[in-house]
Amino acid sequence: MVAPVALRGTRPVLLVSCCVALMLLPQPRAVDSFAPLRAAMVTDQIQRRGVADPRVLDAMRTVPRHRFVPATLQHLAYTDRPLPIGLDQTISQPFIVAYMSEALGAERTHNVLEIGTGSGYQAAVLAHLARVVYTIEIVPELARRAAATLKDLGFTSVHVREGDGYAGWPEQAPFDRIMVTAAPERIPQPLIDQLRAGGRMVIPVGSAEQWLTVVEKTAAGVIERRTIPVRFVPFRRGRG
Ligand code: SAH
């Protein structure tokens, strides 16, 4: 038996110092075992349905969606469906997040307002595309959780506020881009007002039947264009 003998004398001291030295070195990021599932999600669910913006695809490949769903549902995080996140709310289907992000056309210099933080996942995707993201959530517990998740993952350019997003975020307006992820029956006027001239908003509109609508604020006025039928939770009114 060589090993016990070899560990006698100064060797253990050397071993301990090496361990301490290793602990002091910057640790490589934990291996993300979900990365292959995420890559498959992008090719099979998102690219296959026509989303092609390379920046959006890259963001969808990067953001760890499983960290934004309840622990018990992590194994379903990369499936082709919305998932419950508690308090009667849902995280959108990956394709819808990608489709809306592409439709928004956020650029690296833009400030973005999101209404309906939910899990914080869409905000994290937007953080990859824009300079800064302001996001408002009406359910206090969800706002708190999303802020904690985003902080944990190191998203310093996302600011979460609890309240009724109907009034927007006047202190940070105007916005280059606005994304709404709950469906009102009509587009809230304060959000149109807080859109920069030349800016764009993506918003589901309707109740029983909802259409994802792209709103452009042009010199000639506000132009609305319906895109695809969608199903979002209702835009609530109340706290603010
Ligand atoms: N973007 C989210 C999913 C949105 S679910 C994600 O990536 O996980 C829609 C969210 O909008 C819900 O959390 C709901 O509570 C919130 N919401 C509904 N009405 C709102 C309002 N008036 N202001 C802010 N948030 C609202």
Image (cartoon, rainbow, N blue to C red):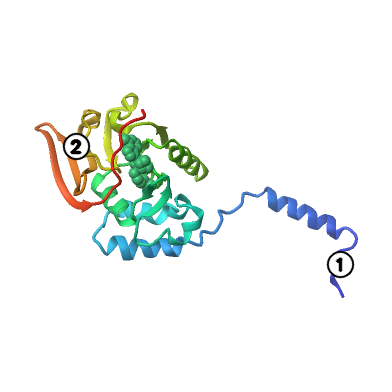
Question: What residue do we see at 81% from left, 56% from top?
Answer: 14
- Which element type, helix, strand or loop, lies under badge 2? loop
Ligand 1 within 8 Å, label 2 CB: no
Whether 191 is drawn above or below 50: the answer is above
Q: Is residue 52 left or right of residue 224?
A: right
| Residue 147 x, y percent position in the rendering | 46, 39
Question: What residue do we see at 31% from left, 25% from top?
Answer: 170
Q: Quadrant of residue 16?
A: bottom right
- Residue type for callout 2: Arg
Q: Quadrant of residue 174?
A: top left
Residue in front for this viewpoint, 9 or 100: 100
Q: Quadrant of ligand 1?
A: top left
Q: Crowding near pointer 2: few (<14 within 10 Å), some, many (20+)?
A: few
Q: Which mark is residue 6?
A: 1
Q: Crowding near pointer 1: few (<14 within 10 Å), some, many (20+)?
A: few
Which residue, given by chain and number where applicable, does mark 2 sit on? 186
- Residue type for callout 1: Ala
Cα separation, mark 1 vs mark 2, equals: 77 Å
State the residue lying farthest toward the top.
171
- Which element type, helix, strand or loop, lies under badge 1? helix
Residue 125 in view? no
Residue in front for this viewpoint, 190 or 237: 237
| Residue 216 x, y percent position in the rendering | 17, 38
Whether 185 is drawn above or below 5: the answer is above
